[in-house]
Image (cartoon, helix red, strand yellow):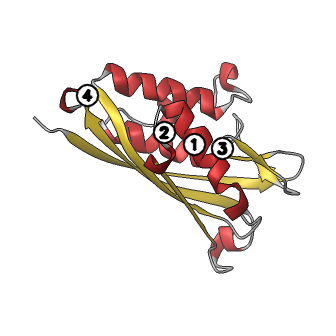
Amino acid sequence: MTTIRIGNGYDIHQLSPNRPLILGGVEIPHSLGLLGHSDADALTHAIMDAMLGALSLGDIGHYFPPTDPQWAGADSLVLLAKVNQLIQKQGWQVGNIDSVVVAERPKLKPHISTMRDRLAAVLGLAPNQVGIKATTNEKLGPVGREEGIAVYAVALLVSSSEL
């Protein structure tokens, strides 16, 4: 029996005025926020997709469709907790998460520790099990033109029977 599974996730959201910028459950001061049906937390969304992908359970749109009004403005950390419960019911647990947030602005380094702590708390992990890196797109493409923020994430799941 396989005792580990790896999944990857990706999310991108358009930047828009009059929206909060939320990443990893942290509201970050900025003139623009991410546009989406929920709170548009692209970091948390990419992590959820990585977790679901590791078990071939589809993506977050299957569980929290943007056409369903009950998810309008939803706190993505609440959705992350639901995804974590789902994988635990399947007999798995997160071993670690690694992610890269791609944004030209704002500078994310001052917020990474808080983002890591919030995500770790929701997942029942130690902060050192949640990796978050930030980079720019060197002014290339829609992220480089500051039209949006993209996130890549990888999740390692460990079979609960191995713990």
Q: Position of residue 128 (x, y in %)?
A: 47, 50
Q: Is residue 71 above or below residue 28?
A: above
Residue marked by disc 4? 160
Residue marked by disc 1? 44
Residue marked by disc 2? 48
Under mark 4, the amino acid is Ser
| Residue in the picture at 73% in, 73% down | 145
Of the numbered discs 4 and 1, the one sitting upstream in the chain is 1
In the rendered image, the quadrant that contains the C terminus is top left
Q: Position of residue 123 (x, y in %)?
A: 49, 33
- The 10 Å Cα crowd at callout 4, few under 14, some 14 to 19, many 20 or more, is some
In the rendered image, the quadrant that contains the N terminus is top left
SS type, badge 1: helix
Q: Compute the Cα span from label 2 to label 3.
A: 11 Å
Under mark 1, the amino acid is Thr
Q: Compute the Cα span from label 4 to label 2.
A: 18 Å
- The 10 Å Cα crowd at callout 3, few under 14, some 14 to 19, many 20 or more, is many
| Residue in the picture at 39% in, 36% down | 52
